[in-house]
Amino acid sequence: MATDQSTARIDLGDPQHGENLQRILQGSPLIGSVWLGSVAGTGMLVAEAGAAPTQVADGAPARLARRLFGLVPDPGWESELIPAQVQAITLSRQTILFKEAENLLVRRCTDQADRALLISVSNTLSPAAAQALSLRLSAGAGTGNLQDLLAGSGDVLAGAVLQLPAGELVATYRRADDASKIRLNAALGRALAEALSGILQPADKSLIAVAAHSMERVTRVDIESDGQLHTVAQVPMVPEAVFGLQASVGIDMDILRRVQRDALNDALRCAIGALLEAGLSTQIVPFPSTDTEFLAIVDELRHLPEDDLIARLDIGGFANHGFGEGEDFQQCKECIYYLPHRKWCDIPELPLPVEAHWWCRLWKL
């Protein structure tokens, strides 16, 4: 069974991508631009308000993504890649397979300009609530007692005060139950302080590379500066593919996350469709005729690495068409696991964006 994830690609020439980007822009006047591309340097598709999507060989957003995620070699620091006065940064893990994870929010203190507050919150806390909490706590963190400040909020799992520009953690906080898995250390503090100053290091020292040692994994970065929010996220299960947008910081964060989630799912769905159209071989037989056989397939899926898209499609027995005839014709849209409003397969071990006319061997009525 082939498990080479590099076969999953984003074809920027597919008109569906342009339509998806335009739909995002039409959904909110607070979103100024969106883009989809490859940090490997194969180009990017950019859409701005009031203009048709255009494909370009490279651009500042793609270079920003390369610097943030460090997925390809980078020659060094590039001035003005991000604005010099960054007010806040959020590091998050977004994954198709749900796992309990933490979001790390970093915000300059409003009562002391040379300090920033770091707080870790569970990803079960809504994005809007997390941002509001970060704003409220940063107003008193510069000079106050960190233990008293953060202990009063049950949503904070861990926290620290960052001295700027050196990046020294001058105070730290962890809940008594040690709920946070994030390790707030000196290396992370220095990397965050540099990013707050508009400096992003080369790939081997990238913000994400440093953060990964403290947070297990980071797949999304938000940078807030000059009233604008720049957000970049890796497309799940598609190596080196990234999606980004620029919006006003006034946008509702819950709406923004939903837009981002749908955009990433759209990109992944197109990549899956391209694989199936190209003739990817999958195990459409045997079709499980008993619960025991069904659960055996589910168990096999459960033990896959979460980013192994090819194996997931193979074991799931995906096809880009239905099976059967007449009343016995089977497609995703008739399956009990299909969520039509999201075009989504809701089997916990097989959570993927799908088209209504597709099929897999875990189909159930």
Image (tube, grey):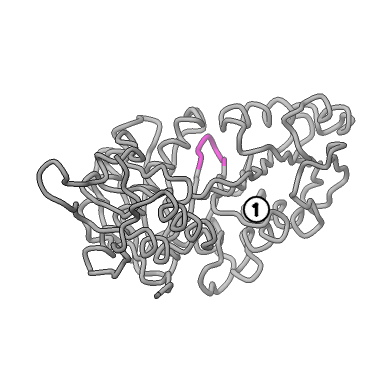
- Give 111 or 7, whichever is nearer the viewer: 7
x then y, percent, for residue 256: 46, 35
Is residue 61 in sight in this rendering?
no
Q: Which residues are magenta?
A: 224-229
**Could you tell me the amino acid type at mark 1?**
Ala
Q: Quadrant of the N terminus?
A: bottom left
Residue located 26% across and 62% down the image? 274
Q: Quadrant of the C terminus?
A: top left
- Position of 304 compared to 350: left or right? right
- Position of 116 compared to 203: left or right? right
Is residue 76 covered in magenta?
no
Residue located 20% across and 53% down the image? 15
Q: Which residue is mark 1?
A: 195
Residue located 49% across and 27% down the image? 252
* Prevailing SS of the magenta stretch: strand
x then y, percent, for residue 212: 66, 59
The crowding category of the residue bearing disc 1, from other C-alpha atoms within 10 Å (few below 14, some 14 to 19, many at least 20), is many
x then y, percent, for residue 325: 11, 49
x then y, percent, for residue 258: 44, 35
Residue located 83% across and 42% down the image? 178
Name the quadrant containing residue 309: bottom left
- Give 271 or 43, whichever is nearer the viewer: 271
Q: Secondary structure at mark 1?
A: helix
Is residue 227 covered in magenta?
yes
Number of marks drawn: 1
